[in-house]
Image: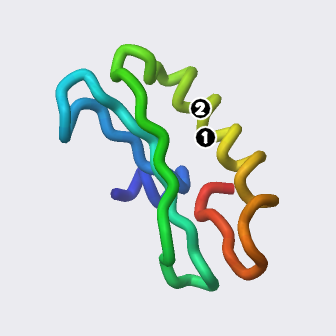
Amino acid sequence: MHAARRKGYAVEHGENEPDVACIGTVVVRGSTPVGALSITTLASRMTPEREAELAGIIAREVPPLLPEGLHLLLQ
């Protein structure tokens, strides 16, 4: 939990389904969570490099698409 708060996103490797991984972040209005965004892939494809790449893509591409007043915890 601390790592997710520090990074602004969480990663899961096979915790729900074997061989499945995801990266997810929270959409907030002010300090209130109102939604989430997640990308799911095969666990073998979620390398540390790919995790960092996806986090960067989310942080760069998603905020301009959100309605006014919403933002990601991932910066």
Across and down, in percent, residue 20 comes to 29, 28
Q: Image quarter for residue 30?
A: bottom right
- From mark 2 to mark 1, how far is it between C-alphas? 5 Å
Is residue 42 rendered to the left or right of residue 61? Answer: left
What residue appears at the point 73 percent right and 81 percent down from the top-left corner?
69
Across and down, in percent, residue 43 comes to 34, 22
Which residue carries the number 1 mark?
A: 55
Establish if 18 lies above or below 60: above
Q: How is the image coloured?
A: rainbow
Quarter of the image for the C terminus: give it: bottom right
Mark 2 lies on a secondary structure that is: helix
Q: Amino acid at mark 1?
A: Ala
Q: Amino acid at mark 2?
A: Ala
Mark 1 lies on a secondary structure that is: helix
Across and down, in percent, residue 38 comes to 47, 48
Badge 1, how many Cα within 10 Å: few under 14, some, many 20+?
Answer: many
What residue appears at the point 35 percent right and 32 percent down from the top-left corner?
21
Establish if 16 lies above or below 51: below
Quarter of the image for the N terminus: give it: bottom left
Establish if 30 lies above or below 54: below
What residue appears at the point 48 percent right and 40 percent down from the top-left corner?
39
Is residue 15 rendered to the left or right of residue 21? Answer: left
Residue extending furthest toward the right:
64
Q: Nearer the viewer, residue 3 or 46?
A: 46
Which residue carries the number 2 mark?
A: 52
Badge 2, how many Cα within 10 Å: few under 14, some, many 20+?
Answer: few
Residue extending furthest toward the top:
44
Across and down, in percent, residue 40 comes to 42, 35
Establish if 4 lies above or below 21: below
Could you tell me if the residues under marks 2 and 1 are in contact, i.e. CB atoms within 8 Å?
Answer: yes
Is residue 60 rendered to the left or right of residue 13? Answer: right
What residue appears at the point 56 percent right and 83 percent down from the top-left corner?
31
